[in-house]
Amino acid sequence: MRLPRPVSIGLLVLVGLLLVWLAVARGPQPSPSAAPDASPQDTAYPAGVDTRDWDDIDACRDDVLPEELVEVVDGVEGGGPFEYPDKDGSTFGNYEGYLPDESRDYYREFTVETPGLDHRGARRVVTGGDELDPQVWYYTEDHYESFCEFAP
């Protein structure tokens, strides 16, 4: 069955309009390296990186890093304030021994909020080195059972 030419053209126009509508309805898609809800000036978003390949801690997969990490990184680099001031910024003892051996005050821990919880949850950032400009950043989503490394 062959459609008359005006009907064929009408269907093609309709399909074209549908495709345009779908593209507009989806809106612009964020870049995987940009933070969710980031303004054009905000280009930095934490990403998995292995700066210490000798430490047996792998780079974080970018899909593991939660968007709440941005707030923690900003807080660390800005010196606070933090949601849990008695805990955030305190010395992380590395008692489990999963991180490389360093001096007692080298590591500090910070809470990464977990949406929907009314307590600290299990997610943490552990930094190493200078308090306001850490040399290394680790993330754990399971309260120190495993770590991965990222860079802000």
Image (cartoon, rainbow, N blue to C red):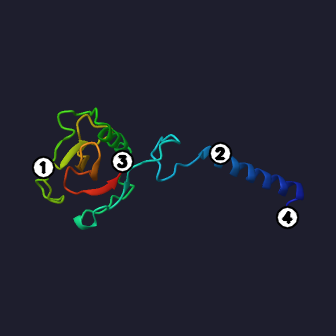
Give the number of the mark in front: 4 or 2: 2
> How many angstroms separate mark 2 from mark 3 (CA)?
28 Å
Q: Secondary structure at mark 4?
A: loop
Question: Judging from the image, what secondary structure is the residue with disc 1 in?
Answer: loop
Q: Residues within 10 Å of mark 3 (few under 14, many from 20)?
A: some
Mark number, residue 93: 1
Which of label 3 and label 4 is nearer to you?
A: 3
Comparing labels 2 and 3, the label whose residue is closer to the camera: 3
Say if mark 1 contacts mark 2, CB within 8 Å: no
| Image: 115 above or below 32 | above
**Amino acid type of the residue that numbered disc 3 sits on in the rendered structure:** Pro
Number of the label disc, if any, that sits on residue 2: 4
Asked if 73 appears above or below 19 in the picture, the reply is above
**Image vertical order of residue 67 relative to residue 6, above or below:** above
Going by the numbered disc 2, the residue's amino acid type is Val
Q: CA distance from mark 4 to mark 2?
A: 33 Å
Q: Name the residue located 12 percent from the left edge and 56 percent from the top edge.
A: 96
x then y, percent, for residue 21: 68, 46
**Numbered circle sitting on residue 24:** 2
Which residue is depicted at the point 45% across and 46% down?
35
Q: Nearer the viewer, mark 1 or mark 4?
A: 1
Quarter of the figure with residue 84:
top left
What is the C-alpha distance between the residues marked 1 and 3? 24 Å
Residue to which mark 3 is pinned: 66
How many numbered marks have been drawn onto this rendered protein structure?
Answer: 4
Give the mark nearest the N terminus, 2 or 3: 2
- Marks 1, 3: nearer the viewer: 1
